[in-house]
Amino acid sequence: MNMTLYGIPNCDTVKKARDWLAEHGCAYQFHDFKKDGLTHAQIALWLQAVPWEVLLNKKGMTWRNLPDATKASVVDAASATAVMLASPSVIKRPVLCHAKAVLVGFTSDLYQQELKVAS
């Protein structure tokens, strides 16, 4: 199964996802938001699978540190995409893309259910 895990390497949740994938023998490519960047097309692809409200992390420090005017401007997928491109750390991490789905965030139960690997 061809998978790509998107995130930033020092994020604790990304580290947990990477550890889980390694422990379960799941091969994947890692894409660092900050180092490798993101494109409008990539975010648009994710938004075909998940709502922008799921992808945009309004609970994190990056969101809280944005200017109030920027936060107020996020009202739909297009405005959320603009903010995510300008500040990729505002994306809920990790994002795991594989043949069947786009998974946002990490829990071992979610990965187990979606990836159907042996425990």
Image: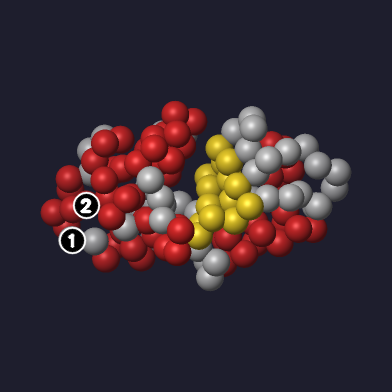
**Residue drawn at point x = 33 percent, y = 50 percent:** 84
Residues under labels 2 and 1: Cα distance?
6 Å
Q: How many marks?
A: 2
Residue 67 shows which numbered tag?
1
Residue type at mark 1 is: Pro
SS at circle 2:
helix
**Place of residue 12 in the rendered image (x, y in percent of width and height, measured from the top left):** 57, 67
Residue 28 shows which numbered tag?
none
**Residue drawn at point x = 63 percent, y = 52 percent:** 29
Is 38 placed above or below 36 here? above
Asked whether 74 or 30 is in front, the reply is: 30
- The colour scheme used to paint the residues is secondary structure
Q: Is residue 88 left or right of residue 78?
A: right
- Is disc 2 in contact with disc 1, using a CB cutoff of under 8 Å? yes
Is 60 placed above or below 5 here? below
The residue where tag 2 is placed is 71
Q: Is residue 25 left or right of residue 17?
A: right
**Place of residue 61 in the rendered image (x, y in percent of width and height, measured from the top left):** 36, 65
